[in-house]
Image: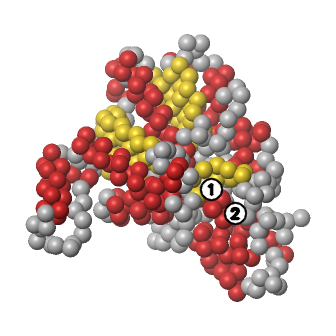
Amino acid sequence: MLSTKFSGEIIMRNKHLGLNEFKFLLKAAVSSGIGEQTYAPRMVFHGREACPTYGDGILEMEEFFHDSIDKLLKRNKISPSEIDVIVVNISMLATMPSMAARIINYYKLREDIKVYNLTGMGCSASLISLNIVENIFKNEKNKVALVVTSESLSPNWYSGNDRSMILSNCLFRSGGCAILLTNKLSLKNKAMFKLKQLVRVHHGAKDESYHSCAQREDNQGNTGFHLDKTLPKAASLALVDNLKQIAPLILPIRELLRYTIAIFMKKMNWSSTKGGPKPMINFKTGVDHICLHTGGKAVIDGVGANLNLSEYDLEPARMTLHRFGNTSASSLWYVLGYMEAKKRLKKGDKMLMISFGAGFKCNSCLWEVLRDLDDGNVWKDCIDNYPPNTLVNPFLEKFGWLHDEDPDTFTIPDDYVIS
């Protein structure tokens, strides 16, 4: 768990950073929306983030696999031999044998299991995995699928000084989720949700979108994840194109007609509010809950503004970002867990999931809640503390003195000198 003080130690033991970079990171951390209870991989606590090993990445993933999959199978009384399909998505760690193969070996899954191991799909990989299972279920009946989604930070912790790449250290954190999907009628009573619609949009043909976020090396050869200034624009364009496709599938006809008429009147200058705001479609007419990817405070704010969402709608994403950070493709399931722990999800409710990922992609899907849900899940030890009175983290209070330092005379205080 990354405290404010330890985060400062990590930053200040990076020999490539100076006072200007420290000030930049302080500003980023203060406005990140991330709290003091997020998680980082073990090698960071061992002081080896600048020189991770191949084994660090594997250890990080296997610890998560064994914990989450064991709990999932036990809770649902499913034997490993009952699994027909496995889909694993970890974007920035490719191993041989694959991570999916490691799970198959550990749990001794059947020889005829269908196996899919995804890399490079980014934060939107969860819904891509769902889409794979959805397509299999269309052609094969009475199947059980295991989807495992996570990200390996161990080999991807950035130790250089490129500002577009050190931002990822402020945002991405360790986490993951394991999910069971089935089209077996005999398991219907155990199901929590039913997948109703799924839409994927890919803007990889647009150069600006394609380059907006990518894994790369800096000028000194340090590998990291680049977040470009064009990222908000790329996300907005992908979101609009995705919503254009999914809106007719999930919204009532009356809302679609209202919006169409409002747009037409605006174009013809027939509206009584000439020069006023552009008409907005109301997704809450067909959706009870919005489950947003915790891509960062700016992403949550942007989607909230585009969809005219209330703070109540955005609360699960904001609280997840604060408690767990951006856990990449698994972040959606932490947001969903918050809704469940807060007892928001009732039988018959509709929930829209929206995710973004490198490429650039925007994927969305609609779930129907099949029964009232109130499990504390991963939030059970802290849900009563959320939402807190303030989301302001203590970074400015702890490190605000950096603003008064002179670049010519600055030295790292003894408290942060790592021997």
Specify whether residue 209 is in view.
yes
Give the residue at the far right of this rendering. Answer: 419
Label 2 element class: loop
Q: Are marks 1 and 2 in contact (CB under 8 Å)?
A: yes
Frontmost residue, 182 versus 276? 276
Instruction: Decide if residue 396 is on the left or right side of residue 301.
Output: right
Q: Identify the residue at horizontal 54%, vertical 70% (top origin).
A: 31
Q: Tag 2: residue type?
A: Asp
Residue 374: assigned label: none
The disc placed on residue 162 is 2
What secondary structure is found at the residue carrying circle 1? strand
Q: What's the distance in space between the residues labelled 1 and 2, CA to CA?
A: 9 Å
State the image coordinates of residue 142 (x, y, percent, origin top left). Answer: 39, 17
Residue receiving disc 1: 226
**Would you place residue 388 above or below residue 288 in this image?**
below
Instruction: Tell me the kind of residue under disc 1.
Output: His
Residue 18 horizontal side relative to residue 98, left or right: right
Q: Position of residue 65 (x, y in %)?
A: 62, 35
Which residue is pictured at 41% across the width and 62% down the height? 302
Q: Residue furthest top?
A: 112
Mark found first going from the N terminus, 1 or 2: 2
Q: Is residue 96 left or right of residue 409?
A: left
> What is the crowding at mark 2: few (fewer than 14 residues within 10 Å), some, or many (at least 20)?
some
Residue beneath the point at 55% across and 26% down: 116
Which one is in front, 191 or 182?
Answer: 182
Compared with 287, 29 (above or below) is below
Residue 361 visible: no
User: Which image quarter holds the C terminus?
Assistant: bottom right
